Amino acid sequence: MVQHPHQSCAGGKDRLMKFNMVVANPPFSLDKWGQDEAENDRFNRFWRGIPPKSKGDYAFISHMIEAALEKEGRVAVVAPHGVLFRGGAEGRIRRRLIEDNLLDAVIGLPANLFPTTGIPVAILVFDRSREKGGTNEKRRDVVFIDASREYESGKNQNTLAEGHIEKIVATYEARKDVDKYAHVASFEEIQENDFNLNIPRYVDTFEEEEEIDIDAVQREIDQLEKELAEVRAKMAQKLAEIER
């Protein structure tokens, strides 16, 4: 879905329509998406790199970013988690997008949200106002949100309640760390991770197991063994009385 067109391809001119907001849920890892024509793309949408023939995710992302207004437009795209960490051509494109300061947020969502797939997905938010000359050009961090564990479970499909959505939006707008839920990563931190955006690298959701009191457990075992010995003794006594 695209909103608020700025200019069109009127008059047969080879110009992309431009929008201040581009939102889409493109097909995941589409095979044979048109790589053969991409190298000579008349709109030059793939100048950061041509995605692999068998996975069209970054083809859609590249198109959406080029269709957003320079220094102003924003993009939100639903994608499989593979776009966050896969290497090769996709890794090179991902690195260029981050180095160009376009990535604004990575939001992990629960599995089984869509009727067509049960895999967990992520929303990538790109903001061209972070480009040089844009209102957010000084912003260099990226918000990572792990919202994958908060949802309403359904028989056939999970859903996000209004409260879940409001929490995601509020966390994105606040751009602050939230324990086991969100982390604001600097460019240097992402660079140290070799531009891998896998969410667990940035949001630690590890739950420590409750500490076990070994002495208390041993006392409980001793008590149980004592009670068992007493029961066995009573059983032996009863059996002896029966045999008489």
Image (cartoon, grey):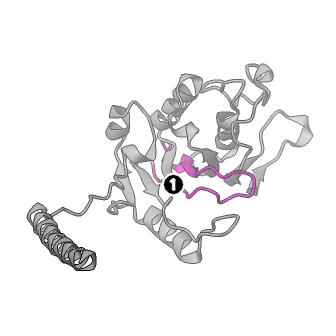
Q: Which residues are magenta?
A: 109-136
- Residue drawn where x is 54% and y is 31% of the image: 86
Identify residue for label 1. 107
Look at the magenta stretch and give its main secondary structure.
loop
Q: In the rendered view, would you say 17 is above or below 191?
A: below
Relative image position of residue 26 (x, y in whole percent) = 73, 46
Looking at the image, which residue is at 8% across and 64% down?
215
- State which quarter of the image contains the N terminus: bottom right
Q: Position of residue 177 (x, y in %)?
A: 33, 60
Number of other residues with Cα within 10 Å of mark 1, as a class: few under 14, some 14 to 19, many 20 or more: many
Q: Residue at x 38, y 38 (%)?
A: 190
Q: Of all residues shown, which one is farthest toward the right?
A: 11
| Amino acid type, residue under disc 1 in the picture | Ile
* Front-lying residue, 140 or 8: 140
Above or below, 217 relative to 99: below
Q: Nearer the viewer, residue 103 or 13?
A: 103
Q: Is residue 219 above or below residue 207?
A: below
